[in-house]
Structures are given as C-alpha cells and as structure tokens.
Amino acid sequence: MVKLPSIILASKSPRRQELLRLMDIDFRVVLKDVDESYPAHLSPEEIAVYIASKKAEAFDEELGDDIVLTADTIVCIDELILGKPESPEHAVEMLTLLSGRVHRVVTGVCLLNKHHYNKFFDVSEVFFRKLTEHEIRSYVEQYQPLDKAGSYGIQERIGLIGLEKINGSYTNIVGLPTEKLYQQLLKLA
C-alpha cells in the first residue's frame, strides 16, 4: 500500500468523511469559514473548481507537509445551478424540478500541497424517474436535504427509489470523485 502524506479534509460533510474512511485514507477535519460566492459568468465545472480553490486558499499560509483536500458539489439542470435549498419548501421545488429528468452533478476538488494547487472536477449524469409529490414531500420531511446540493443524497431513500441510471461516477454524486481523487493523491505520494 502506498503511504500518502497526512491529509486535512476541509469539509464537514459526513459523506466525504465516510468516503475517505472507506478508501483507508487517514485524515483529520479542519474547518474554516469561506465565502462561497462566485462570478456569474462561470460554467458549472468552473464554479465547482472555483469554490473548492477558495476553500483551499484559506489554508495556504499555514500549510506544512499536509495535503489540504477541499471539494464543492453542485447540481445543474439545463443552465440552472441548484445549490443547497434554503427551506424545506425550496427543497420540494428542487426535487420536483429534477423529477422525471436528467441532471448533472459536478464536483470540483482542490488538493493543496506546499503552495501548489492541483485542481480537477468530475461530472456525472443522473436520471430520475417521475417522482410523486408524496415521495418528494416524505423524503424532505424524513431526511436532511437542506445540507445537500440539489436537495438530495443519492445514497438516501430518494436515490434508492428514484434513480433510473447514472452516467459517470457514483461517488462523485455522493460528493467526492474517489476514483480521480485516488489517482491524484498517488502523484503526491
């Protein structure tokens, strides 16, 4: 097994933490408040990488030999970016919009190591069947969609009952493209 440098995960996402644990990667979580605004002219891929990079920049001046791992996931349908919902009703609106349609999940990742930024992204297409209003409202009431881009977790009930197919990485939809991440970490080992 390749020995990777110490990793600082700058994310409170329990899903990202679980993915790293499943990859047998040692890490510690360190959080910083970062403004997640972005220029309006950016594409979804550029937005995800831009925000992940901003999160990493908060660590640039105090970095030792650790690797800082930051990520940002967005959901987009047509040209509309769906971030985290502002309320349960907003979550219902988002899920209704996604119902019966295909959307894209984009995760931008930044690995900061010794003032060098390694940035990349992954894109997955998600096909949802037509969901009933009861299925959507039940999900919003029983789960915590307010901390998830697009108002859902693919690994939760809504994904288990509504997913028709995906094109691309499943773990990218969860919040971290583990396949690409591992390859990039090997380059830093």
Image (tube, helix red, strand yellow):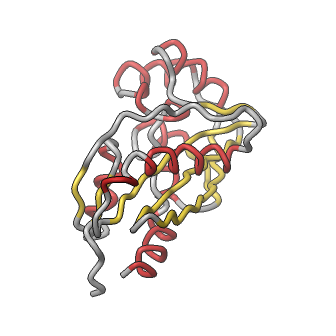
Q: Is residue 187 above or below residue 41?
A: below
Question: What residue is drawn where x is 50% and y is 45%?
Answer: 54
147 horizontally vs 86: left or right: left
**Looking at this view, is 12 or 18 the one in front?**
12
Q: Position of residue 146 (x, y in %)?
A: 42, 25
Q: Quadrant of the C terminus?
A: bottom left
Q: Residue furthest front?
A: 61
5 horizontally vs 147: left or right: left
Q: Position of residue 185 (x, y in %)?
A: 41, 74
Q: Quadrant of residue 32?
A: top left
Question: What residue is drawn where x is 66% and y is 52%?
Answer: 125
Q: Quadrant of residue 133?
A: top right
Q: Residue furthest bottom?
A: 1
**Looking at this view, is 180 or 159 the one in front?**
180
Question: What residue is drawn where x is 51% and y is 56%?
Answer: 109
Q: Position of residue 22 (x, y in %)?
A: 28, 64
23 horizontally vs 152: left or right: left
Question: What residue is drawn where x is 27% and y is 69%?
Answer: 25
**Looking at this view, is 126 or 157 the one in front?**
126
Numbered marks: total: 0
101 horizontally vs 19: left or right: right
**Looking at this view, is 85 or 157 the one in front?**
85
Q: Position of residue 147 (x, y in %)?
A: 41, 30
Q: Quadrant of the N terminus?
A: bottom left
Q: Is residue 145 above or below residue 72?
A: above
